[in-house]
Amino acid sequence: MTDPLFRKDAYLREAQGRVIAHTAEGGVVLDASLFYPTGGGQPGDSGVLVWDGQHLPIATTVKGDKEQIVMVPAEPRALPPVGATVVQQLDWDRRHKHMRVHTALHLLSVTLPFGVTGGSISATHGRLDFDMADAPDNRDVIEQALNTFVDMDVVVSEDWVDQAVLDATPELVKTMSVQPPRGAGRVRLVRIGSGSDQIDLQPCGGTHVARTGEIGSLRLGKIEKKGRMNRRVYLHLDD
């Protein structure tokens, strides 16, 4: 399996890794990955692998077999050989924007307390699909609430709990169609705020900013009807 370094420190921009496999499709598997693999609506990371004076641009990162993380080259090039030590250099600007958007979508799920049926993240905006019949008519209030959460600048942290804890508190799960990430009987919870300032707590395997103030100003985008009980709500970074 690949050790997910991004989960230990989402702000790590460069790290070493050892090549443990190549995939049939031409991907590279390391023993430890700085790059986040596509999942939970968050795109896979991009960047560069460097070794022995050579470099390999990575277009995206995906999940492989047996808990492996696969880095997908941007173009056909010679791969670092199995056993080689490489330096992973993350496209930090892109990742950091994903982190800002991902945390902002958690805030959106608080301001619109409906079941979530889908979502996606990009470097400029994100969207959530909600199980609700009618579009909200208080756009200004929603946007103001989101930016108030940002201005509170509360800490974003994580907890790992036994799966039994989640089974006993199913209300923590907001996604209706996707099961939260579980590993070895444990579930990762992302907490925004704490104590009397706690804003949100839900299972999530993605990367997030350390404080809500880091998100920056938010702008509510268009709201689309995607079915009788489905509304798609877009949220944009303002810078």
Image (spheres, grey):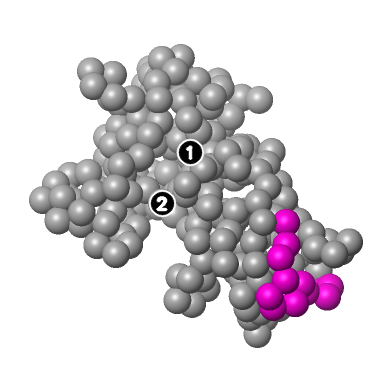
Q: Residue 81 location, x and y as percent?
A: 75, 77
Q: Secondary structure at mark 1?
A: loop
Q: Quick check: can you spot residue 30? A: yes
Compute the Cα span from label 1 to label 2. Answer: 9 Å
**In the image as oriented, which residue stretches furthest toward the right?**
53
| Residue drawn 66% across the image and 71% down it | 19
Q: Image height check: is 172 above or below 34?
A: above
Kind of residue indicated by mark 1:
His
Q: Residue 50 location, x and y as percent?
A: 79, 59
Q: Image height check: is 10 above or below 104?
A: below
Kind of residue indicated by mark 2:
Gly
Answer with the quarter of the image where residue 52 lies.
Answer: bottom right
| Residue drawn 49% across the image and 77% down it | 65
Answer with the quarter of the image where residue 92 lies.
Answer: top right
Q: Image height check: is 130 above or below 139?
A: below
Principal secondary structure, stretch drawn in magenta:
loop
Q: Is residue 82 magenta?
A: yes
| Residue drawn 23% across the image and 18% down it | 196
Neighbour tally class for label 1: few under 14, some 14-19, many 20 plus, Cα within 10 Å: many
Task: Check residue 205 in the rendering and tell me which mark sits there, or answer none.
Answer: 2
Q: Quick check: can you spot residue 223? A: no
Q: Which residue is mark 1?
A: 208
Residue placed most toward the observer, 120 or 193 = 193
Q: Residue 9 location, x and y as percent?
A: 51, 43
Neighbour tally class for label 2: few under 14, some 14-19, many 20 plus, Cα within 10 Å: some
Residue placed most toward the observer, 90 or 140 = 90
Quadrant housing the C terminus: top right
Query: In this image, 221 relative to 166: left or right?
Result: right
Task: Check residue 164 in the rendering and tell me which mark sits there, or answer none.
Answer: none
Query: In this image, 51 relative to 14: left or right?
Result: right
Which contiguous range is marked in magenta? 76-87
